[in-house]
């Protein structure tokens, strides 16, 4: 009898652990199921809300939707934001479920991934609004250049647009903690090199070209002739109309005599 009890004790402990683990497993499954339903509702609400504020119009004008279509995506950028919101809710439910099961390492890993999703969401918003602002500035510079009669108005507009877009991309990368100091320092080095190259081109080799371009862009107005200045009055306040004639020395009679 004691031997049978000795062999049945591990089985009893195992069944006791299973009995204690099954309710937690059922609770985790319910949490995941409820989280999945909430995630679908949140995705639908995000997509509907972005369409209600005409967010796809902004991304279409910014060129983001066209970029996604070239990558093979059929829908617009609102689906991307809806998917981010969906997976954020799913990850939150998984964190709660695995925490209830006592799997701390898995919970920690999923928690880090879950807190990374909002950074991606904010980075996409920065990229969308920044691309739209860059397109607006590029079009404004191009329109101003055409109205001013500049021949390189389109080039100046594209340069302004891509310069702002590069700055926006760096902000988005910094938001998702990609690159960090290396990206910022590389941007500063490239910007300094471009400015130094332009300074050398304008100051040395492109001096005449720069002068011609400035003359074409902003032509100089013909200067009006200045009126002639009059001599200041003498101390007595009376100006002499006939200036004194210059007296030349006369030749003497000895100089008029012929030489022997």
Image (cartoon, rainbow, N blue to C red):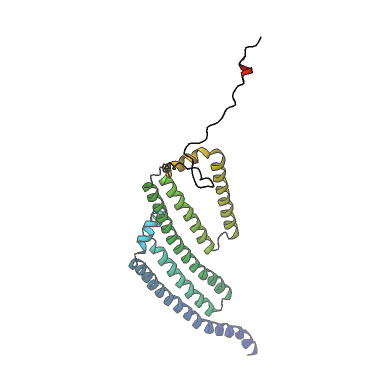
Residue at x 43% of width, y 69% of height: 85
x and y, in percent, of residue 248 in the image: 57, 27
Q: Residue furthest bottom?
A: 1
> Which residue occupies 40% across, 75% down?
38
Q: Is residue 74 above or below residue 96?
A: above
Q: Nearer the viewer, residue 250 or 30?
A: 250
| Residue 102, picture quadrant | bottom right
Q: Which image quarter is the C terminus in?
A: top right
Residue at x 62%, y 14% (from the top left corner):
257
- Residue 217 horizontal side relative to residue 116, left or right: left
Where does residue 120 sit, x and y in percent of width and height?
48, 65
Location of residue 171 with respect to 195 vertically, above or below? below
Quadrant where the image shows the N terminus: bottom right
- Which residue shows up at 37% across the image and 50% down it? 143
Task: Residue 113 in the image: state x and y as whole percent.
Answer: 52, 68
Q: Position of residue 158 (x, y in %)?
A: 43, 49
In-front residue for pair 128/207: 207
Give the total of numbered labels.
0
């Amino acid at each position: 009898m004691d031997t049978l009890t000795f062999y049945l004790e591990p089985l009893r402990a195992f069944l006791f652990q299973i009995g204690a683990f099954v309710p937690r497993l059922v609770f985790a499954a319910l949490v995941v199921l409820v989280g999945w339903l909430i995630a679908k509702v949140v995705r639908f609400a995000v997509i509907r809300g972005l369409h209600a504020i005409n967010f796809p119009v902004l991304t279409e004008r910014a060129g983001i939707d066209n970029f996604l279509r070239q990558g093979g995506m059929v829908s617009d950028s609102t689906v991307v934001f809806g998917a981010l919101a969906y997976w954020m809710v799913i990850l939150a439910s998984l964190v709660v479920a695995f925490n209830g099961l006592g799997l701390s390492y898995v919970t920690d890993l999923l928690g880090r991934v879950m807190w990374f999703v909002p950074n991606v969401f904010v980075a996409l918003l920065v990229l969308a609004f920044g691309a739209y602002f860059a397109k607006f500035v590029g079009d404004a510079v191009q329109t101003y250049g055409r109205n001013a009669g500049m021949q390189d108005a389109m080039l100046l507009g594209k340069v302004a647009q891509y310069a702002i877009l590069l700055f926006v991309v760096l902000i988005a990368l910094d938001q998702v903690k990609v690159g960090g100091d290396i990206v910022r320092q590389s941007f500063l080095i490239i910007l300094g090199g471009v400015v130094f190259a332009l300074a050398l081109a304008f100051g040395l080799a492109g001096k005449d070209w720069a002068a011609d371009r400035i003359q074409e862009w902003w032509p100089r107005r013909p200067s009006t002739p200045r009126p002639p200045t009059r001599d200041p009055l003498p101390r007595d306040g009376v100006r002499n109309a006939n200036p004194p004639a210059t007296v030349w020395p006369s030749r003497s009679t000895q100089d008029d005599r012929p030489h022997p």
